[in-house]
Image (spheres, rainbow, N blue to C red):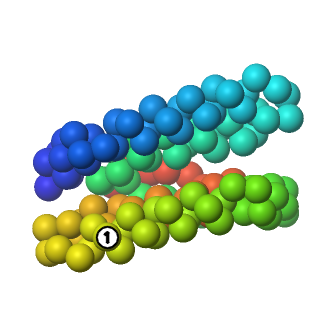
């Protein structure tokens, strides 16, 4: 299921979103201040490219929490809302439910990326 899900995900728009995240990461890495945000964008690009078969572990300390608060205020809320809306739209049909679940997983990461680790199952 993971292979088929990832292939369908890539064909139906995952590649474009992953490229967008990677481009945002490159732009953010131009400045020294933007490098931590760029690294989180690359993390999102990797998960967005092939989300099936991956889990997200959350951790981190005070530094990650403070960085996540800044991230949420600047961009995290809007990205998470976009992923949640995509997840709801995907869950309208039975066939789209697995894709909706992946969108919800990405919404949580888009909201709180610092300190998160992406692992393969």
- Residue 72 vs 21, above or below: the answer is below
- Residue 48 vs 24, above or below: the answer is below
Q: Residue at x 35, y 51 (%)?
A: 51
Asked if residue 53 lies left or right of residue 48, the reply is left
Residue furthest toward the top? 30
Residue 88 point in image, percent of width and height: 35, 74
The N terminus: image quadrant? bottom left
Decide if residue 55 is in sight here. yes
How many marks do you count on the picture? Answer: 1
Secondary element at image label 1: helix
Residue 23 point in image, percent of width and height: 56, 29
- Residue 10 vs 1, above or below: the answer is above
Quick one: label 1, few (<14), some, or many (20+) residues within 10 Å? some
In which quadrant of the rendered view does residue 37 lie?
top right
Residue 87 point in image, percent of width and height: 36, 68
Q: Residue at x 23, y 76 (%)?
A: 92
Q: Which residue is mark 1?
A: 89
């Amino acid at each position: 299921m993971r292979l088929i899900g990832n292939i369908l995900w890539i064909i139906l728009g995952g590649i474009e979103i992953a490229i967008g995240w990677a481009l945002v990461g490159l732009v953010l890495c131009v400045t020294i201040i933007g490098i931590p945000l760029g690294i989180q964008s690359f993390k999102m690009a990797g998960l967005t490219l092939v989300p099936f078969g991956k889990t997200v572990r959350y951790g981190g300390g005070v530094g990650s929490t403070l960085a996540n608060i800044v991230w949420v205020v600047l961009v995290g809320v809007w990205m998470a809302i976009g992923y949640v809306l995509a997840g709801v739209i995907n869950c309208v049909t039975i066939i789209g439910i697995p894709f909706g679940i992946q969108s919800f997983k990405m919404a949580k990461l888009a909201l709180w990326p610092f300190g998160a680790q992406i692992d393969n199952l």
